[in-house]
Amino acid sequence: MTGARSHIRAGLVAALCLLLGTGCLGPRSALAAQAAPLETGLGVFILESPSRKEGEAAMLQVAIENATPRLTQWGRLTQPVTVRLQPDHGALERATGRSGYEWLRAWARYDLLDVQAPDTWHPLKASQRDLDELLLHELTHTVMFQLAASSSDWTQKKIPAWFREGMASYTAEQAYRWPTLEQLARTLEDNPDWEPLLQPEELFEQQMQVAYGAAHHAFVFLMNRYGQDTVKRLIHAMRQGPDFQTAFASTVGLPSEAFLRDFTRYVRLRGFKGGRLLQSPAAL
Ligand SMILES: [Zn+2]
C-alpha cells in the first residue's frame, strides 16, 4: 500500500513539475534549500526539504534547535551542516546508498545529514519527541566527526562503531531502547561467539539491539571510569593526526582492545551489581 501510494505521489509531483516547466523529476532534485541558514549555539545548518513537507521541515528545525544544549557538552560544529529531509524510506536508502536496514531513519556524515520524513516512519509516524531524540543521536555523530578530523581525513580515523554509536546513544539518553547490562550478560552467555564490540558488523544488521546496547554500555563504562574530559581529549587528540587506536592508547592510557576486554569481563562477571563500577575488573 505504501509503495502504491508513493508511486501515485511521485506521479503527481512529476505532473506538477511538467506543468510548471521546472523539470524536477527525481526525489533529490525535489529538495529545496530554505532561504536562510539556521543558526544555533551549536553551529550553522542548511535545511533542504521537499516543498510538500513544510510541516515536517518545521519539526526538523525544532529538533535541531532542541538538540543544541545537550550537544554543546562536546563542543561546537566547525563547518555548516546540510540537513536533507528525505520524503520516505526509499529516498533515504537511495541518498545514503544503504539498503536492507528497515529501522534506519537517518544517516550522518561529516557535514551532511539525511533524515527520513517523520510522517513516513513505520509503523507509527514520528512525534516531535521521536525526532528530537533522533537528531540528538545523529548530530552527536556529526559534532564528533568535525571535532576529531577535517573533511578530508574523517573517514581515515577508523573510529569504531562501539565508540560512535555509544557516544550518540549516551548523548541522546537511549538506554531505554537497548538490553540492560544483565540482559547483555545473559545474551553473551547464550551466544559465546558473538563479538558485539570487536566484530559488530553482522550484529548491527541482524541483532541491532545487542550491537547498540553493547556500544551504549561500553561508552558509559568509559565515561564512568575515565571521565568526560578524557573522552573529549581523545576526540581532540585525533584532530592532531593520530587515528582512534593511537589516540585512545595515549589519552586513556591503555589500548582500546584492552579496554574492551575489561568491559566484557565486567559484563560477564556482573561487575555492575553491588556498585562495583569503579573497582578494577582484575579484582572482581
Ligand atoms: Zn548512530
Image: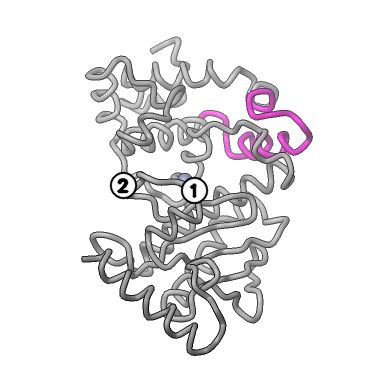
Q: Residue sitting at 38 percent across and 64 percent down?
A: 88
Q: Tell me: 228 left or right of 219.
A: right
Q: Residue sitting at 49 percent across and 84 percent down?
A: 18
User: What predominant SS class does the magenta segment belong to?
Assistant: helix
Query: Which of the 4 quarters of the picture holds residue 80?
Result: bottom right
Q: Residue sitting at 74 percent across and 38 percent down?
A: 239
Q: Distance between the residues labelled 1 and 2?
A: 29 Å
Label 2 crowding class (10 Å Cα cut-off): few <14, some 14-19, many 20+?
few
Query: Between residues 242 and 67, which one lies in front from this camera angle?
Result: 242
Measured as percent of width and height from the top left, residue 7 is found at 32, 70
- In the displayed structure, would residue 258 be above or below residue 204? above
* Residue at disc 1, CB closer than 8 Å to ligand 1: no
Magenta-colored stretch includes residue 48: no
Closer to the chain start, of discs 1 and 2, is 1
Dot 2 falls on a residue whose secondary structure is: helix
Q: Which amino acid does label 1 sit on?
A: Gly
Q: Tell me: 146 left or right of 61.
A: right
Measured as percent of width and height from the top left, residue 277 is found at 42, 26
Chain part drawn in magenta: 225-248
Quadrant (top left, top right, bottom left, bottom right) of the C terminus: top left
The residue identified by callout 2 is: 176
* Residue at disc 2, CB closer than 8 Å to ligand 1: no
Label for residue 278?
none
Label 1 crowding class (10 Å Cα cut-off): few <14, some 14-19, many 20+?
few
Asked if the residue under mark 2 is in contact with the one under mark 1, i.e. CB atoms within 8 Å, the reply is no
Measured as percent of width and height from the top left, residue 1 is found at 21, 66
- What residue occupies the far bottom of the structure in this picture? 19
Query: Between residues 202 and 254, which one lies in front from this camera angle?
Result: 202
Q: Tell me: 184 left or right of 36.
A: left
Q: Residue sitting at 29 percent across and 28 percent down?
A: 184
The residue identified by callout 1 is: 97
